[in-house]
Amino acid sequence: MARVPHVVADAGAFLSGAALQDVAQSVYTVPEVLAEIRDRRARRRLAALPYELQLRRPRADFVRTVTEFAKRTGDFPSLSAADLQVLALTCQLQAETAGPGSVRLQPPDKHKRPRKGRQQHGPDSSTELPDNAEFGSFLYWRPPLPSIEDELQEMLKTHSISSSPAATDELQNSEDGDGAEEEEDDEEESDDDNEGWITPSNLKQVQQDTGHCDTVPANVQVGCVTTDFSMQNVLLQMGLHVLAVNGMLIRQARSHILRCHGCFRTTSDMTKVFCPHCGNKTLKKVAVSVSEDGSLHMHFSRNPKVLNPRGLRYPLPAPQGGKHANNPHLVEDQPFPQQRLSRKARQKTNVFDPDYVAGVSPFAENDIYSRAANLQIRDRALGAGRRRLNPNAVTKKFVKRR
């Protein structure tokens, strides 16, 4: 298998211990990916890599391009800052090697679903039924299989009757003949043992024959090794090459929509938290595929616990008012306070005031008595102080504090 000249690796490639030296000639990553790896074994493997790992940061324009593209495909809520950096670096390397025209800036158009008013001509009633139509009807009846106990009883009776020496000689001769036949059969089976078995040596060939994965073609110059489905979807729709951990080329993209389990409506806006039709917080991510005629097929999970009832034990607190109220986010159009600083705190940072005193001075005035100071509100850009969380929200337990 030919090695790819430039490969960008995600955290999943290092956590799985992939042999990237057999896949790529040059391996790249971003510093944010190394910060995500906290596993002790993965850190040890990362410290003793058999190849040179090059750290690069993508340009700001490629990060902006990838972010806008991920918002259009609906995968932006599932991507972290490190994921966007990896996508931008892959896009940058592809533009440097094959030119800017090799990167797709707009998602491909999908087939629209046919309207309900249009009638689709179905198959005629005169069409013949398939051969296995009788198996799907309730009138199909299969004769019962013969029981093994009756056959064993008959065999025991025949052996008990044939107790004469002539019969024993015949039995011995028949056993010798059967043994010779069994030896011949064993030899034939041993000859056929090597055919049809899947071994580590022919595993990739079997996967190629069944069509599950493809080998990397020789014209691939840049690829990205990742196990994140959202990243794979963005890369494939941008026209970039996605590599699996074993070095195979991934060709199938996966799309997602949000489906409400309360009113069963769907929306393609992946930034929604509450259902735009019923307003409940019951939106779940569902994989979809579009057929050739434009019809949409949703693929649901077999897990019956799609909506976890955990976190419905305690009642919600009474809503509070005031300019520093901080209530749980329950509906989409819920108003929130602006969480501004006090007037005294705002005056302290006025550098054009003639009475302005630097904050490091022992004579500087500090706001420590207002409600904004008690709520630890320092600046609007820093999260607006302490949040009043939902008591029903699921929190992590047994987390080691730093």
Image: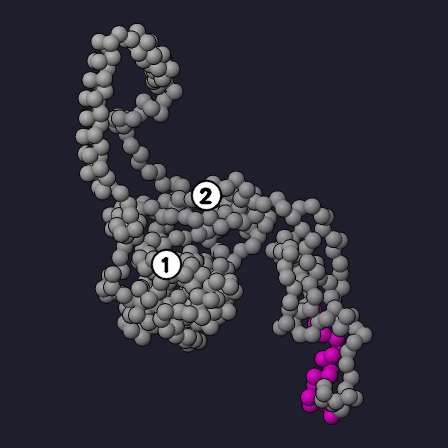
User: Residue 144 placed where, x, y %?
Assistant: 36, 16
> Does the magenta run of residues contain 142?
no
Q: Give the prevailing secondary structure in the magenta stretch.
A: loop
Mark 1: amino acid: Val
Query: How many residues crowd mark 1 within 10 Å: few (<14), some (14–19), many (20+)?
Result: many
Mark 2: amino acid: Phe
Q: CA distance from mark 2 to mark 1?
A: 26 Å
Looking at the image, residue 293 sits to the left or right of residue 13; the answer is left
| Nearer to the camera, 89 or 327 | 89
Observer able to see residue 148: yes
Which residue corresponds to the image point at 63% horizontal and 53% vertical from the top-left?
Answer: 394
Which residue corresponds to the image point at 37% horizontal and 50% vertical from the top-left?
Answer: 112
| Nearer to the camera, 32 or 158 | 158
Range shown magenta: 339-354
Observer able to see residue 71: no
Direction bottom: furthest residue: 354
Q: Which residue is under mark 1?
A: 245
- Give the mark toward the camera: 2 or 1: 1
User: Residue 224 placed where, x, y %?
Assistant: 36, 64
Q: Which residue is under mark 2?
A: 300
Residue 64 appears in which quarter of the rendering? bottom left
Residue 271 numbered tag:
none
